[in-house]
Amino acid sequence: MKSVLLVTDVPFWLQRKGNHQRIAAMLTYLANHFRITVVFLGIEKPQLRDDNVTVIHACRHRGLTELAWKLFRALPGRLQQTIIRLLDKLNLQRSLDSFGDDHVVEQFSSIYNADHFDAVIIEYIWHGYLAKAVDQKQSLLLLDTHDIFHRRIAEYARFGRTPDKTVTKEQELDVYKQFSQLIAIQTVEYDYLDKIYPGHVVLAMHPVKAHPGRYTERMCNSSDAGKLTLIYFASYGDANVDAIEWFVDEVWNDQLAEKFELQIHGAICDSLRISKTGVRIYGRSPTVDAVYRDADIAINPQRFGSGLKIKTVEAMGYGVPSLTTSVGAEGLEDAKDQALLCADDAADMQRQLLRLSDVTLRKFLSQNGLEFVAHRLTPEACFGPLHQLIDAHHPENLPDNRFDD
């Protein structure tokens, strides 16, 4: 059986955020085909119950840095988010160069050289410095991009925002050149990367489980005379906070409040101070099922960002009709007007919400969303090409330099 080594500082086993879920799903799929070892660089003690995955804890934080992180993580979520927002306002961004760590390289090299790995997957460009420790004549070296960060930074800048990490286009492309293959999380980013590095990009979207019958049951239990329930379900993040604050300030009005109730769920609630008729802040929910069980419509009014908006496909998997923006639907263009609706300004979003009062339209979007997920977002559809790429790897076929300048 071939072996794969994955490196990340994302506590994926928690599955609280989209990137947690994406990495966990990929590992679960790959573990059915390969021997998997994970090098975890975060401060949390890994809590993974999977006999098919070996996790080695190699924390990149030491001494006072580790203590500071542990103290920060021990703070209540609301206080953590207040500190993060303050740091963002002070424009205290981490540069790509700040991630390089000789101690981590030494630890990683020891782990890598102690075994044979047919493939090495590194999560995010921030740990691209570890590429130098991999023998690409022996191992297929892949970068799981998650986002194209120079595009993300440009999107943030359009709205006067700065993400917590910064990198130039040239720096990011230099990282890409160190890898045998790049993994793109959605089709727009795949097309972008494939034009620069043709033949060196594989698409691996986020799989979603289809829950047929859930929304039908919801509609049967709903009263025609009652208000429809809008759901916004999100973790903390600048783009998410901006999305719901913009929606409440610019889109939500008395006419909508007569027809809908807006429910906000998730860790994002710790950062919100919203008091408006028809809007209820629920906080963190015990399960995803509990959130979508009571949803008539899901919204994702995201105005900037990159990557795949997992909350959008998650709602589709539950058969819940979705209203999002062009940003929220990036990589899901085939689903527009069939499995979800899009609107990019307040007036159009109000119009589309009123359209969704029509039960026939909601049924149409619900059914198409479930079919999209069932055919396009299964684990095999998402990760099959990655599996085939690794399975076809033979060391003698690897040249010294994978990318041509």
Image: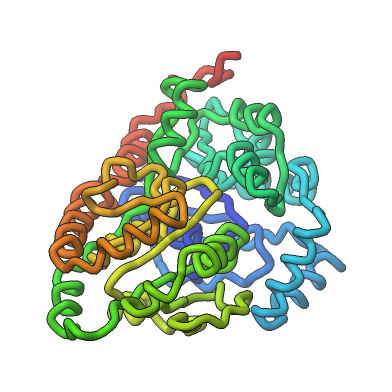
Give the colour scheme of this rendering: rainbow
Please state which of residues 265 and 174 is positioned toward the viewer in this rendering: 265
Question: What's the residue at 62%, 79% (across, down)?
Answer: 273
Please state which of residues 302 and 75 is positioned toward the viewer in this rendering: 302
**Image quadrant in which the N terminus is located:** top left
Location of residue 227 (image quadrant): bottom left
Q: Is residue 318 above or below residue 131?
A: below
Number of on-image labels: 0
Question: What's the residue at 41%, 68% (across, down)?
Answer: 50
| Left or right of 130, for residue 368 | left
Please state which of residues 171 and 155 is positioned toward the viewer in this rendering: 155
Location of residue 188 (image quadrant): top left
- Measured as percent of width and height from the top left, residue 244 is found at 52, 66
Q: Is residue 334 above or below residue 341?
A: above
| Left or right of 180, for residue 31 | left
Can you see residue 204?
yes
Question: What's the residue at 32%, 37% (across, down)?
Answer: 385
Location of residue 218 (image quadrant): bottom left
- Measured as percent of width and height from the top left, residue 168 is found at 71, 34
| Left or right of 243, for residue 299 | left
Please state which of residues 267 and 209 is positioned toward the viewer in this rendering: 267
Question: What's the residue at 39%, 30% (across, down)?
Answer: 393
Q: Is residue 22 above or below residue 285?
A: above
- Measured as percent of width and height from the top left, residue 127 is found at 66, 45
Q: Please, which residue is most extreme toward the front here? A: 255
**Image quadrant in which the C terminus is located:** top right
